[in-house]
Image: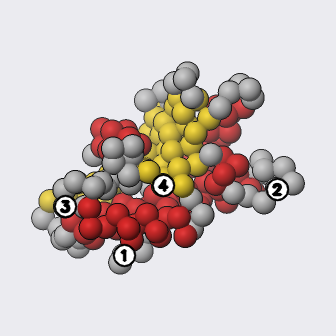
Amino acid sequence: MQDVILPDKFNSPSYGQMSWEQVLSKVVWFLGLDRNASYDVIIGTDSEAQDGEADFVTALIVHKKGRGGVYFWGRQKVRNLYSLKQRIWHEATISLSMAQMVVDDFAKLGLFGNSSASSQALNLEIHVDIGPNGKTRELITDIVGMIRANGFKVATKPSSWGASHVADRHV
């Protein structure tokens, strides 16, 4: 498995191109707009490959339940990934690394109060582009297990819209 390198630039349909620090600031701002609302933070990655080079897009979505949301996406290219299995594992590890970075950065900002930093405090869920039908079905148990073992909630197809619809839009 290749090392996971996260995007250094992100894009937003609402705010244009941004650094990670700017994305984090917008996420904190958006979550603070309505303290009575219920929010989900979703992270999903999708990819497309050609001739051993894969284009990965990772989306960070803040969904204000019943009232829309905001999202940010970053792109990276990775070489020497020739199989679907390699790509799917890389998608999952990118999303997992991004989720851990979000939790760590929220903790550094002191946004969890006296409790320890956790994905539950953010209602964070990782969406993976795998499902019970098709070529990826054999990967479900292992990938879902890896994500859960790291303390995150996970969704697969057909519920993994963060990867299969939002990130996929920009691949």
Q: How would you rate the neighbour count of disc 4 (Cα within 10 Å): few for under 14, some for 14-19, many for 20 or more?
A: many
Q: Mark 1 or 4 closer to N-term?
A: 1
Name the residue that disc number 2 marks. 115
Residue 135 circle label = 3
Residue at (30%, 63%) from the top-left corner?
88
Any part of residue 23 in sight: no
Image quarter in which the N terminus is found: bottom left
* Image quadrant where residue 105 sits: bottom right
User: Which residue type carries mark 3?
Assistant: Lys
Q: CA distance from mark 1 to mark 4?
A: 22 Å
Q: Where does the image place residue 34, in percent across and percent down from the top left?
A: 71, 25
Residue at (57%, 68%) from the top-left corner?
150
Q: CA distance from mark 3 to mark 2?
A: 41 Å
Q: Mark 3 or 4 closer to N-term?
A: 3
Name the residue that disc number 1 marks. 2
**What is the residue that sits farthest to the left in this orientation?**
51
Q: Where does the image place residue 122, in percent across and percent down from the top left?
A: 66, 46
Residue at (77%, 47%) from the top-left corner?
111
Q: Mark 1 or 3 closer to N-term?
A: 1
User: Which residue type carries mark 4?
Assistant: Val
Any part of residue 81 in sight: yes
Q: Is the Cβ of the residue at disc 3 closer than 8 Å to that at disc 4? A: no
Q: Mark 2 or 1 closer to N-term?
A: 1
Q: CA distance from mark 2 to mark 4?
A: 22 Å
Tell me: 134 left or right of 118. Answer: left
In this rendering, the label closer to the viewer, 1 or 3: 3
Name the residue that disc number 4 marks. 154
